[in-house]
């Protein structure tokens, strides 16, 4: 089972994909549409073009607790005092991830 405990880099990839999808569905889709879908499209493009930066932010904001057969990842995202901060807790086991806590602070 210890061999199936995913590494931090795998978590960073997982969390980047999840955060990007969440922002596309919840933030970009709510962009004002007074210019048609231009702002929504630019929002999605901005997220897609900055995957490395998003991954770095997640990696720097995450603490991993390794319990040999599984790991617990705690991510605290806070980009600016003007934007809400978020906490995520995820278990990595059997080469997969299960987020069991996601909340806005």
Image: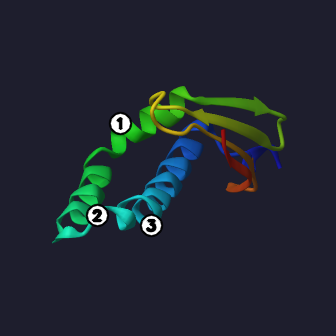
| Marks 3 and 1, the one that precedes in the sequence | 3
Say which label, 1 or 2, has the lower sequence index.
2
Label 2 packing within 10 angstroms: few (<14), some (14-19), many (20+)? few
Q: Position of residue 52 (x, y in %)?
A: 35, 40
Nearer the camera: disc 1 or disc 2: 2
- Does dot 1 land on a helix, a strand or a loop? helix
Tell me how far mark 1 sits from mark 2, CA to CA: 25 Å
| 38 or 69: nearer the viewer | 38
Task: Give the residue number, with chain letter if any, for mark 2.
Answer: 32
Q: Residue at x 29, y 60 (%)?
A: 44
Q: Find residue 104 and report its horizontal and vertical position in percent.
A: 64, 45
Residue under label 1: 53
Work out whether residue 30 or residue 69 is closer to the camera in this orientation and state it.
30
Mark 2, mark 3: which one is toward the viewer?
A: 2
Mark 3 neighbour class, 10 Å CA radius: few under 14, some 14 to 19, many 20 or more: few
Residue 60 image offset from top left, x and y in percent: 52, 26
Q: Residue at x 43, y 55 (%)?
A: 20
Check if mark 2's residue and mark 3's residue have beta carbons within 8 Å: no
User: According to the image, label 3 marks what residue?
Assistant: 25
Circles 3, 1 touching at the beta carbon (< 8 Å)? no
* Crowding at mark 1 (Cα within 10 Å: few <14, some 14-19, many 20+): few
For residue 8, side relative to residue 74 (left or right):
left
Side (left or right) of 98 relative to 67:
left
Alpha carbon separation for disc pair 2 and 3: 14 Å
| Residue at 66% over, 38% down | 105
């Amino acid at each position: 089972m210890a061999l199936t405990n995913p590494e931090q880099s795998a978590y960073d990839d997982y969390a980047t994909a999840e955060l990007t999808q969440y922002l596309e569905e919840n933030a970009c889709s709510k962009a004002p549409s007074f210019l048609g879908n231009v702002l929504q499209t630019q929002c999605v493009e901005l997220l897609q073009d900055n995957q490395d930066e998003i991954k770095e932010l997640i990696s720097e904001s995450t603490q991993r607790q390794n319990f040999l057969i599984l790991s617990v990842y705690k991510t605290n995202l806070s980009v600016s005092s003007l934007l809400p901060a978020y906490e995520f807790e995820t278990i990595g086991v059997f080469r997969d991830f299960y987020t069991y806590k996601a909340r806005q602070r």
